[in-house]
Amino acid sequence: MRILTGIKPTGSLTLGNYIGAIKSLATLQAASPEAEVIVFIADLHALTTPQDKNELRQRKKEIALVYLASGLDREKTILFNQSEISAHNQLGYIMECTSYIGEMERMTQYKDKKKKQVEGIRTSLLTYPALMAADILLYDADIIPVGVDQKQHLELTKTLATRFNNAYGPTFVVPEGFIPKIGKKIMGLQNPTKKMSKSEADNPKDYISLFDSPAEGRNKIKSAITDSGQEVKFDSKNKPGISNLLTIYSGLTNSSIKELELKYASSSYAEFKVDLGEVVYNFLSDLQTKCQQLDSSGILEQVLKRSSAYANLLANRKIEKVYKKLGLR
Ligand code: TYM
């Protein structure tokens, strides 16, 4: 079995990315030690919008360090930069030739971004899901852990894999998404009806970056919007603020929401937020210390080198198979 996921190095990584996508990977790896775990930094995807090259390099490294620091097995995990494996571009083009423009135009992420940007929208923003399908199908991945915002892209990947298989005979594994029960969509701290986003927030208090100082993280929890009423109870419809904070607390501690509701049954919002502030403080300082240690150990470079050699091997084999089926070879 293969488990695969990716993260785009745009904006700073948030608690949303961590709880929604990064953490579940280590959990899945621990639960199925026989599975091969493939993680990549989706640097080509970052170019769908303008990027500063120095920041991009920095973010790529940060993501790689966070993945390794998140509890993944360093000996076994395959971790690489997407742009180092040219087969992603090759299969991306084949996926463009397998999909229809209407399918791309229906993607809600594209529609949302187009609404906001209006001018200078890059062609790649539209064709992005074809490259994402290629990222997954190249490696015959079975399980794709992602947050709920990627569900539509995953559905399209399944459609394209099936369409190709039907036209040319069995070629790709049709993957399944893995969307965590808790934390599939962490919301903004100032606007808990909108996804916590690294690239779309106007107010830095709306998200906690994994590289915010621990004290800053704690303060952002303290100033998070809560709802009317005073009961610490999960009710995402009527109490989106406190429900989101409960989800974050549960995502960082592995206490269930029920357990937390019981623990804070007679506490005020403020008391609850003080404790969650400490949880976030400790989480950030622990993660950042691990990242610093890894950064100075040279382990990351070794993992990246070993992984890209292996990924190239798998991906090139797949491309040859696909090209043969299409009559290109
Ligand atoms: P990206 O970089 O926007 O987000 C990376 C992962 O984090 C999840 N996520 C969240 N989960 C919960 N709450 C949030 N507030 C939150 N914000 C982000 C996302 O769902 C995602 O799982 N297209 C992808 C990257 C990608 C990819 C792939 C993923 C490229 N190729 C192949 C899986 C397989 C993206 O832009 O994710």
Image (cartoon, rainbow, N blue to C red):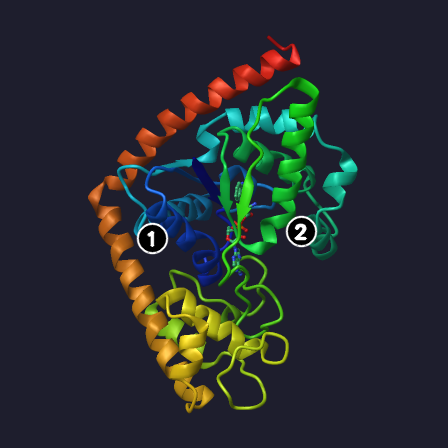
Q: Name the residue under label 2.
A: 109
Q: Where is residue 100 in the image (x, y as percent from the top left)?
A: 76, 33
Quadrant the N terminus occupies: top left
Q: Residue 292 carries which label?
A: none
Q: How far apart are marks 1 and 2 (CA)?
A: 27 Å
Q: Is mark 2 on a helix, strand or loop?
A: helix
Residue in the image at 35% along x and 80% along y: 275
Tell which of 123 and 34 is nearer to you.
34
> Is residue 58 toward the left or the right of residue 50 in the image?
left
Asked if 3 appears above or below 233 in the picture, the reply is above
Report the amino acid beneath label 1. Ser
Report the amino acid beneath label 2. Gln
Q: Position of residue 246 (x, y in %)?
A: 46, 74
State the residue lying farthest toward the right. Answer: 102
Tell which of 233 and 130 is nearer to you.
233
* CA neighbours of label 2 inside 10 A, class few (<14), some (14 to 19), many (20+): some
Residue in the image at 59% along x and 60% along y: 200
Whether the residue carrying mark 2 lies under 8 Å from ligand 1 is answered with yes
Q: Which of marks 1 and 2 is in front?
A: 1
Q: Mark 1 points at which residue?
A: 70
